[in-house]
Amino acid sequence: MLDAESEQLISVQTPEQWRRRRKELGVWVERSKPVSLGKALYDFDGIEVDAKIYPALVELKSIFIQTEFSCAGVSMLDEPEDHSLYAYVTLLEGSDTERFIQYAMERMGHRLLVTYEQNRGRYDLSSFFIGHNRSFCFLLAEVAKQYGNLFHNRPLSF
């Protein structure tokens, strides 16, 4: 739940999507969660980060978007408990951050939940559904790469 005094909801999800999110959370809490793989970590600028979110962090850094916190979120595909429930990346305010967030919201649609904490000068971008955690990580990396190609004059890669 958002702290109304410090967090502002930026993204737009429908009431039906919010109901589906609550239902998904209830199912997740009750389901069995066997561990199939351990939590994989990579070094990112001297900090251990989840392997699944690492490509997104690399792409964000390449377009000069400063990150603060991140997590790949839980998944039945690997580690269902040793993560936050939702994949997320915290972005610090910067000269290009808002434009990137608008671009990401256009490309990722309802999959992306965005909140803003004015008193801390940061945005939280997260997966809207638990079941989209892995695609959130992949899509965020792709969106950052596309953004760099369009707005930072990087050559297109195929």
Image (cartoon, helix red, strand yellow):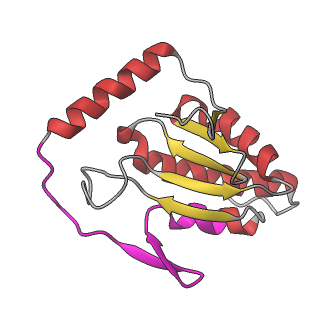
Question: Which picture quadrant has residue 4?
Answer: top right
Instruction: Point out the residue furthest to the bottom here.
Output: 46
Q: Looking at the image, which is closer to me, 107 or 50? A: 50
Q: Residue at x 70, y 68 (%)?
A: 61
- Asked whether residue 141 appears in the rendered view, the answer is no
Q: Position of residue 151 (x, y in %)?
A: 86, 53
User: In the figure, is residue 43 to the left or right of 8?
Assistant: left
Q: Position of residue 64 (x, y in %)?
A: 78, 65
The C terminus - image quarter: bottom right
- Left or right: 76 as drawn, with respect to 118: left
Residue 44 among magenta residues: yes
Q: Residue at x 87, y 56 (%)?
A: 95
Residue span colored magenta: 32-59
Residue 111 visible in rendering: yes
Horizontally, residue 115 falls left or right of residue 18, namely right
Residue at the image position 30 percent from the left and 30 percent from the top? 24
Residue at point 65% right, 63% down? 67
Q: Position of residue 96 (x, y in %)?
A: 83, 53
Q: What x and y, as percent, mark residue 46?
A: 55, 85
